[in-house]
């Protein structure tokens, strides 16, 4: 029997001003045309109604602990449309009193509305996609903002009243040096964010960078960048709690923590994924990927791109794919509570991982060692 975990809401906003060459997300450049923002919010509300009707008792009366507007560039949507969607969600769902509501935004002035208006709409956390403070690297990454615009936008958000702000920062960028990665980090720390997502640029399939790879630092240099930046973040008071996430005390991203802890979440919007636990097991649902197809759907059935129960044979792997990203791990008993599977199902695999030095020998806590974090894909693969 699965214990019902916390429930979140993910909202996918698929448009951006320009598609970046490294991006493999479900995002679509506007190509000089305005997106149908109001129509899309209408579709999101209908999508939410459809999911609530389909999932019924599995989500009824469960409090929403977090909302995350991802994209794309969600802040392209006017604040009044974000407010309209949040009002509709609150009319249909019970929000926790301290629900975290995050909006992803880019620093360019054409990519966000007034931060005061987003705050008034109910958004209480911002996540800036800065990626670098080196203007030459920003151009190579296809970003349309400058480092100065990033700093200005962050300052405007602070002035608007935001005290919980994440910065996305990448390293191992084209021809970047270790010193260059550290300079980027110092520029980020000078802004005093409460959270940093610090992750390595990788070449993803079906991207412009994959087709025409730029010269990237080698693996050893990338590892040196990670180590020196981790040390600097720790010195600045940012605790690493996930592979690429660092936070000041009390500022961990609750939405992403719910993902990594194998929590539940409703997913609405083009290409959005959701996960819901009920008496039958763990169910995943995803929506039509293309905004045009999603918007044209007249019924919830037409909006759905796929829906399946995760078979027991895959459930342990899916759990580990998320939980092992957490630096402190998860209580061993959470495996049974979140998957409904007995610990005996993975006992032999756990022993193998412990013998290889990838997991700590602790029967109360599922946690990777430092070596296990470095070879995380290999650790997770053991549970396939």
Image (spheres, rainbow, N blue to C red):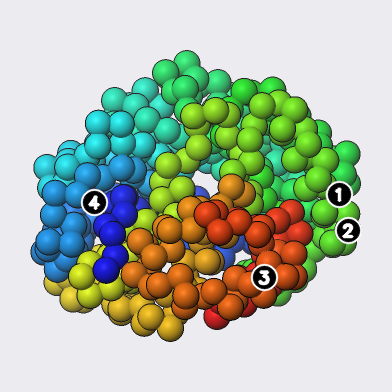
Specify which label sits upstream in the sequence, 4 or 2: 4
User: Looking at the rendering, in which quadrant would you find the N terminus?
Assistant: bottom left
Residue 165 is left or right of residue 282, and the answer is right
> Which secondary structure, mark 4?
helix
Residue 97 is left or right of residue 29, and the answer is left
- On the image, the x and y values in percent for residue 179 come to 88, 39
- Residue 369 in sight in this render: yes
- On the image, the x and y values in percent for residue 302 come to 21, 76
- On the image, the x and y values in percent for residue 30 come to 45, 56
Extreme residue toward the top, this view? 159
> Which secondary structure, mark 3?
helix
Q: Which residue is mark 3?
A: 353
Confirm or deny contact between disc 1 and disc 2 (CB under 8 A). yes
Distance from the alpha carbon under mark 4 to that under mark 3:
46 Å
Confirm or deny contact between disc 4 and disc 2 (CB under 8 A). no
Confirm or deny contact between disc 4 and disc 1 (CB under 8 A). no
Q: Which residue is mark 1?
A: 224
Specify which label sits upstream in the sequence, 4 or 3: 4
Q: Residue at x 14, y 49 (%)?
A: 61
Q: Which residue is mark 4?
A: 41
């Amino acid at each position: 029997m699965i214990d019902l975990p916390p429930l979140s809401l993910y909202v996918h906003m698929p448009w951006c001003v320009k598609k970046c060459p490294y991006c493999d997300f479900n995002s679509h450049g506007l190509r000089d045309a305005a997106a149908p923002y109001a129509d899309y919010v209408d579709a999101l509300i209908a999508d939410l109604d459809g999911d609530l009707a389909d999932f019924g008792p599995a989500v009824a009366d469960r409090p929403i602990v977090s909302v995350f507007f991802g994209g794309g560039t969600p802040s392209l949507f006017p604040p009044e449309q974000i407010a309209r969607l949040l009002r509709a969600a609150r009319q249909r769902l019970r929000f926790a009193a301290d629900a975290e509501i995050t909006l992803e935004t880019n620093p360019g002035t054409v990519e966000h509305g007034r931060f005061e208006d987003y705050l008034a709409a109910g958004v209480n956390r911002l996540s800036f996609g800065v990626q670098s403070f080196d203007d030459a690297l920003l151009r190579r990454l296809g970003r349309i903002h400058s480092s100065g615009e990033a700093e200005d936008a962050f300052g405007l958000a602070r002035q608007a009243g935001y005290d919980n702000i994440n910065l996305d920062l990448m390293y191992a960028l084209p021809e970047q040096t270790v010193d260059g990665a550290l300079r980027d980090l110092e520029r980020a720390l000078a802004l005093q964010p409460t959270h940093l997502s610090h992750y390595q640029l990788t070449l993803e399939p079906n991207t412009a960078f994959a087709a025409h790879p730029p010269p990237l630092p080698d693996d050893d240099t990338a590892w040196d960048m990670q180590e020196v930046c981790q040390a600097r973040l720790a010195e600045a008071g940012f605790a690493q709690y996930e592979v690429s996430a660092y936070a000041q005390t009390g500022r961990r991203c609750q939405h992403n923590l719910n993902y990594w802890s194998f929590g539940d979440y409703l997913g609405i919007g083009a290409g959005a994924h959701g996960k819901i636990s009920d008496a039958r097991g763990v169910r995943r649902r995803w929506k039509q990927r293309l905004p045009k197809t999603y918007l044209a759907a007249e019924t919830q059935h037409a909006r759905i791109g796929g829906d399946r129960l995760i078979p027991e044979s895959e459930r342990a792997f899916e759990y580990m794919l998320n939980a092992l990203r957490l630096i402190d791990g998860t209580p061993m008993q959470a495996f049974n509570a979140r998957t409904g599977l007995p610990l005996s199902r993975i006992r032999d695999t756990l022993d193998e991982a412990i013998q290889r030095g990838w997991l700590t020998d602790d029967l109360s806590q599922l946690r990777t060692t430092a070596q296990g974090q470095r070879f995380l894909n290999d650790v997770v693969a053991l549970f396939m």
